[in-house]
Amino acid sequence: MSVATWVEVGRVEDIPPGHAARVEVDDVPIAIFNCNGLLYALDDTCSHAEASLSDGDLDTSRCAIECPLHGSAFDLATGDPLSLPAVVPVRAHAVDVSDGVIRIALNEDGA
Amino acid sequence: MINGATGVATDAPAFEEAAQGRIASSTGWLRDRRQAAWDAFTAMPMPSSQRDEDWRRTDIAKLKLPLFHDGEGVNDTLVAAIRKRRDQATPTAALVVDAEPGTRVEQSDQLAAAGIVVSSLEEALRAHPALVERALAAVGVAESPFIALWNAMWKGGAFIYVPRSVDASVPVWVAHSAAGDHSATFPATVVLLEDNSSLTLVDDYLSAVGTDELLSDAVTIAVVGRDARLDHHVLQQWGEATWHIALHRTVLAQNARLRMFGATLGSRLQKAYWEVILDGPGAEAEIAGVAFGDASQHLDHQSLQAHRAPQTTSRLQLKVAVRDRARSVYSGLIDVDRIAQQTDAYVQNRNLILSHGATADSVPRLEIRANDVRCGHGATAGHIDDDHRFYLMARGVTEEDADRLIVRGFLDDALAHCPDPGVADLIGGLLDHELEGDEVAGVAPVKA
Amino acid sequence: MTVQAHELTKDYKFGFHDVDISVFRTEKGLSPEVVAAISNHKNEPEWMLKFRLKAYDHYMKRPMPAWGADLSGIDFDDIYYYVKPAGEQSRSWDDVPESIKNTFDKLGIPQAERKFLAGVSAQYDSEVVYHNIRDDLEKLGVLFCDCDTGLREHPEIFRKYFGTVIPPNDNKFAALNSAVWSGGSFVYVPAGVKVDIPLQAYFRINSDNMGQFERTLIIAEEGSSVHYIEGCTAPNYSSDSLHSAVVELIAHKGAKIRYTTIQNWSDNVYNLVTKRAIAHENATVEWVDGNLGSKVTMKYPAIYLMGEGAHGEVLSAAFAGPGQHQDAGAKCIHVASNTTSNIVSRSISKGTGRTSYRGHIKVYPKAQNVKINVRCDALLLDEESQSDTYPYMDVESPDVTIGHEASVSKVGEDQIFYLTSRGIDENEATALIVNGFFEPFVKELPMEYAVELNRLLALSMEGSVG
């Protein structure tokens, strides 16, 4: 277990509601989503095949992201897959906002 | 920082200066071939695990070609290590070291007396240009980016020619090596066997133990005449940070026979094509191999058994053990032409997975367009059988030793197909080191 | 109302067709307007219209697959994506239009069978027109209706599962189906209920240039079991047709679903189907899949073994006659521990026919004690026939036992000789050997299907020797 390291990744106004952004933290691509004003961070790479979740469709009615490649939906809060073909979760990372600055802490313990 | 801060520089044309130098110093058809290869290479995208089926399971996105350059000279301690393992394995008729600063050849006088040529490929271009041209024709100029790059960039290299009805059964040992971080090497072995001749050959790819990042873009071509026989050994023991991309292609004429044995132990990532083209009626190929992956090694073998003539036979068996986070990828194709009736072909890939985190992918494919054939494939993946382990432990063998014995037993089944017994012993010893957890990616230098 | 008559092009048992009695169909070709028209015509809820339009976008964006069979012969602009037949949904046999009854007569559904069958859901064009559920099944709470009715009358269950096994952008043809789907079956079996009679649906393509995009969703709750049978025959028309179905199965804890298909589309049909099942803890899913007809079939029934102790079976048989390409196979994805799967594939190629087995086995890292067995055998009947095998195995767990064996061979001359020396002529001998080769598949079929299959094989074999 390591102590969480908060990394600054951008400003709130960069990601308006219904939008997503892709950042890299320690060479790991992370997708940040704004669902109805709340920010979520997941691994950007789908757990099923090589695809970038930040390019997917954000379903704001259930706060889920649909992978652009094969359509698996993931819960933004937990990273759990809600539909096939993905069967394993993507990691969900902690997000913190203060003074308009977004920080995330990588979840190193896996999904 | 948001959106696309990937931090990767766009690839500048890698090897531009070196390639232009090679083209300028070549003449005639070779100059044309190098130029065409270079033009093709610069126009082709690098293989992508997203676009190319061949590379779907082998990702080379982290191989940054612009960082590489021609290698430094290989020092005497490494050459001594090469000589030592050769001595350990088998007496040879010739030793060729294909490495910077230039190919070194040691050979017995008897070879020349029998008309057998063992030289660098560069030398052969001057002495036997027609023979070299004939052999190189078996590989296209730009079949893939790595083959195009090899065609433009190879230097030194090894060339072996055996005249009609001559037996060169005492092995010729060709070692390919490199040294220095971000050194690129383009190993070349070109073999031409005339009708009714024979050759035993060892292609040995290796570098010193250590973390130098090397690139090996290798090709071996063997053109085997009617009724001729080739016994070919391929040992791969590059250091742990080496990228090894290789094509081993043998073309068999009527009633020609290939026995090939491969042992894959080293490298960070390997993509090796083992190909046999059965071009003449009655040709036969028996290919076998072992691979052992540990740490985070990625070992990819792709085989082709291309039956282009009737009454041809091929067998291929690859046994793989993976440990730690190592990944094995095997894909193979038995391709039977419409005219290749009475083909008998089989391919088998067996995998032993020794730890959580290790993976083995297997894709043995068949494409059959003749109907009077017997073709098949088998693939298995499994772990150490608890019953076997228990059986040995009940006889006083420790669990660790039991596991080692079981893995050796699993691999020995393929190793039994290694044509040269001395080479088989050498490989067996290296496998034992692997199983004991010793580093066998790369060889320890020896005081010259 | 369009009325057309067609000449029979060939003496093919199921190659008849009826006068086209379609009452509503969209214009040829596909556009967002056509998709919206389908949804409006069915009075669908807003979410389904959105689902369809999104699927349409995915479909348009996605390239044609670069692997598998040659699909260049499909003219997507020359297809009616929705045709609704005459007559409203029928509850009793008496209400079924006469011409449709004639169709069933030609298909040879025995009278006795009609009485005893749990329900005959007969798809005529894009809409299910006949549907009969026996009273006692209804009392058990089993839902068996067409998918449109499922959406209308059981919206909560339907929406909970629809599109979760196969998302609309899973692949190009799943996206197409998701945009224009119509008909197909919806089956819901409550916990503990064992449906002991197979549920059957007959499908027919009956309009020239008409695609069929049915959608089937089967949910078996905990401890329940159901066997669903899908049999297809198609009339033989001169221009190409497209059939692109999506089938989703969900087997909850301890449930068992068997899904049997006999595909015998006429040889102008492109049959591009996505079939996928989820097997939860200790559940069993079995695909019994026979492909005899069509010009091109691409179909790889899949089972995702998501719960511990789940078991999957795929039993596949394919026959490719001259000009046909059967690109079929199976996928078993092992996500959980103590899961097992078994795949048996038999295929036969004749004339210029080509069969391909394409399989995918995957074992995820956390799945322990996994056992998988794959056996595929191909028989080549003459010099022009072709067979390919493309098995993909990805193993990411050490605690597995996987065996895969494949063979390709021709009909043995000694077998033929043995039979001909006993007075059986060569054609008949070949047919016997072929029947024997398909035996592992045929023995899993209900009697009437086994009989029909053997009859079809005998027809296909004629003239295969000499």
Image (cartoon, rainbow, N blue to C red):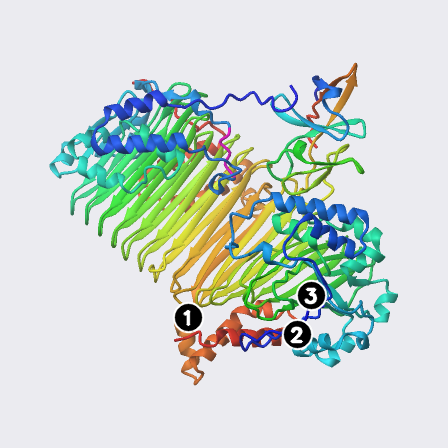
Give the residue type at disc 3.
Asp
Q: Is residue C188 visible?
A: no
Q: Is residue C86 visible?
A: yes
Determine the secondary structure under disc 3.
loop
Who comes first in sequence, dot 3 or dot 2?
2
Q: Are marks 2 and 1 on the same chain?
A: yes
User: Label 1 belongs to which residue?
Assistant: C412
Residue B312 numbered mark, or none: none
Residue C18 numbered mark, or none: 2
Residue C125 numbered mark, or none: 3
Indicate the position of residue C49 as horizontal and vertical percent values.
Answer: 76, 48
Horizontal side of C262 relative to B344 (left or right) equals: right
Give the residue type at disc 2.
Asp
Q: Residue at x 85, y 57 (%)?
A: C153
Horizontal side of B205 relative to C389 (left or right) equals: left
Chain letter behind tag 3: C
Residue range (magenta): B57-61
Q: Quadrant of residue B87?
A: top left
Q: Are marks 3 and 2 on the same chain?
A: yes
Q: Are marks 3 and 1 on the same chain?
A: yes
Label 3 neighbourhood size at 10 Å, few (<14), some (14-19), many (20+)? many
